[in-house]
Image (spheres, rainbow, N blue to C red):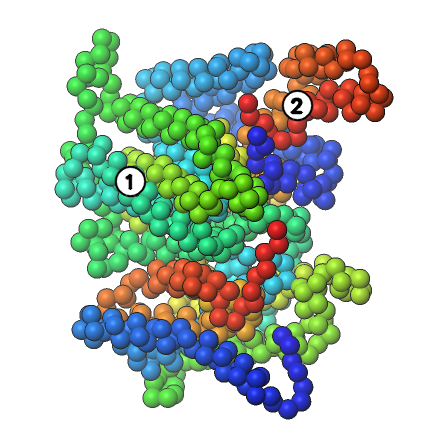
Amino acid sequence: MVRTRGSLRSDQLLHWLAQALIVVSPLIVLYFLLAVLKWVFNGDVVFDRQYIVTGIAQGSVYGALALALVLIYRSTDVINFAQGEMAMFCTFISWSLITQAHWNWYAALVGTLVFSAIFGAIIQRVVIRPIENAPLLTVVIVTLGLFQVVNSLGVFIWQTQPKTIVAPYAKVGTKAIQIFGASLGRTYVGALVITIVVMGLIYVFFNYTKLGLASRASAQNPVASRLCGVPVSLMLTIGWALAAMVGATAGVVAVPIQGLDPEFMQGLLLYAFAAAVLGGLDSPVGAVVGGFLIGIIQNVVGGSALLKDIKDPVAFVVIILVLVVRPTGLLGSKQVRKV
Amino acid sequence: MNDVSNAMPTSGLSDQLLGARGRRLAIGVVAGLVGLWFAYLYFKQQPRPLQTALILGLAYFVLVLLAAPRRYQRLFGLLGIAVFFVLVPLFMPKFENDILSDYGVYILAAISLNMLIGMTGEISLGHGALLAIAAYTVGIMVAQHQVSLYLAILVGALLATAVGFLLGLPSVRLSGPYLAIATLGLAIALPTLGKWSKIDKWTLGSQGIAIRPKFLPQVPEPLQHLPHRAISLDEYKFFLTAALVAIAALLVWNFRRGRIGRALVAVRDSEPAAQVIGLNLARHKVIGFMFSAFIAGLSGALIAYQLASVHPDTFGLNLSIAILAMIVIGGLDSILGSIIGAVLIRWLTLNTTRLPAPTDAPLLGSHLPDQFKTFPTYAAGVYYGLALILIMIFLPSGIAGAYYRFVRSPYRERLFGRRGKAAPAAAVDELPAAGDSAGAQLSPPTTVDAPREVTRS
């Protein structure tokens, strides 16, 4: 991210305008697409503001998970297919803390974050470290193996019956909040607020702390940072721990919305991938923006009677479309291929 | 032609952890433990006829490997496989034959994915989708329109080929992680698509299609009047599967050695180099996808036939990862690897209840809570997920790769005193040494003759 100080120049303004246009372009495309669909299916699909508000709230969860993916991809070049399952595991830890150890919800959230940091760090040290410079196929297969192990362990320990956690911000009897002429349930409000706080903390960490600076440096140029005295491998471990924490947050706030079972992260992971790809795999801001966009798209599509039960395939279609039309995503940087 | 080891590091990875000797030791220890564990499982409970047969077959192959001269090994091996597959089903009860057919189906799926990932290097995590297309085709055609099963299998495989073509198109533009993400999306999204209410007129939604037995083919007339005993339906099912597996394996083997196969390997190993020698990348990638999809279609169609039902949840992400585990554990770019991996993973999956649960563990086990006592059906995932990680770190060419390395390694010759290629080495020795340096380059035949990579003649 290049930041120039001083007065605002007109080319910079143009640049921002272009970026903004790029960011909203999927919505414009969606709008026209929906207009066509509306015409074809006699008004079945609508672009209601309720969908947009709910979509943004729901999208914050996807954005958080996508942010976790992007953090790892940027620092270690690993697409972590196990991200969702790691989050699932941590969420179950929070469930155990709350219902079995009778912790306070917020205390359990903190406890889960601590656990997830340790969990992520251990996984990085034990599983990812040996394959750091391995070819892509190896990395993909190892993270998929991790996916399978963590998923099966989750089934093993917590069984498959769906569970639920009642969050304190969404106790029975609390009313939905009215916003922009749409009503937003408390579960959504809580998810939105908590994920935005976490994203803000991540932003502050990377931009205003020395540790964050060191992390960014080691992601951008490991060799040079090592020469400057940055402990690169420690930074990578910290990156994994952070990503696991962000993922765990996404899991914990998603539970009041959709319930908890060992498979609940698979759908979320798909949307998170769609968000990350849409925003650009190496852009944290893109991941968050992509999350909001995917949330909106999902809600608009889910609002139509025709497409209601195929929301997941729509996320897949988004992935394919983005990859074919603009592989770098909305805000990602261009990949240079070395030969 | 060099095998997977070119695309994947054989050393390097684990050398960082253990060093070459340590790795060899680790592999030996792990293999020994796995062997002991298998023996324990085998003797713990009443042996079943199929297990006895499988163990006898394994013993035969080890015997061939150790005792037969190298030039006859392939012959003996194939002969053994053929005899095994013709004789064994005739002596098995029905449910064992069904299990054998199940192995066959997954061998087909593994061969298909291995062709794609091992040979062309394209990563597909959504192979379950191709299986699903064919399975649904068979289900719909046979159960709802009473079409002949054989025709339905063919149509299903062709439809899967068409979908493979569509999947292959983006693969031309996408590379590496992006293709993996896209296909993963397909794998996760697919079960939902099968439950779409707008098409449940055909797919019957989450209920799935059940094929009534009367629509499935009977044993053909000639086989019912064999001299000694008639072929039963389950045996016929197995032979049909085995025949398709054999045909697919032959096709892939031949394809790998042919022009397009070699071109695909060239594309896998280095795209720029392949482009330089004038290969059309797009065309070859799409061909690879289509061929792989055809075999995947056969496999999916047979799944529908054997289960006599089609259900969307069968073809989710778990199936795709299981197939991936098969080929990685068995060995990439190797038909033998596909077979070994498929049998191993299916054996694990079918025998989860017989696997030791964590409470059986020697010291800690008795202190674990009760919920660890029962083994849920797909907790086999713990085992093969771990196997995926360990194999990728310690043995990237899989079991088949290790096997080939052992067969061609000097250890074997040292153990059994048989030198495979003594003649050229002797010829080198007899040459008048033009200079010490040249002699030093040529003289130790083992360094020339002991390829680290798997080589195929």
Q: Residue at x 43, y 31 (%)?
A: B255
Q: Is the C terminus of chain B in the top left, top right, bottom left or bottom right quadrant?
A: top right
Residue B36 position, x and y percent, is 59, 28
Q: Chain of mark 1?
A: B
Residue placed furthest toward the top: B227
Q: Say whether residue B93 is left or right of residue A269.
A: left
> Could you say which is closer to the camera, residue A34 or residue A293?
A34
Task: Give the secondary structure at mark 2.
Answer: loop
> Could you say which is closer to the camera, residue A82 or residue A207?
A207
Residues at marks 1 and 2, common chain? yes
Q: Amino acid at mark 2?
A: Ser
Residue at the spot of label 1: B158
Residue at the spot of label 2: B409
Residue B95 position, x and y percent, is 32, 28
Q: Residue at x 57, y 49 (%)?
A: A136
Mark found first going from the N terminus, 1 or 2: 1
Q: Residue at x 53, y 15 (%)?
A: B73
Q: Chain of mark 2?
A: B
> Could you say which is closer to the camera, residue A228 or residue A94?
A228
Q: Say whether residue B230 is left or right of residue A191.
A: left
Q: Say whether residue A3 is left or right of residue B44.
A: right
Q: Are marks 1 and 2 in contact (CB under 8 Å)?
A: no
User: Splitting the image into 4 quarters, where does residue B438 fall?
Assistant: top right
Q: Is residue A185 above or below residue A88?
A: below
User: Splitting the image into 4 quarters, where does residue B67 fall?
Assistant: top right
Q: Say whether residue B287 is left or right of residue B425.
A: left
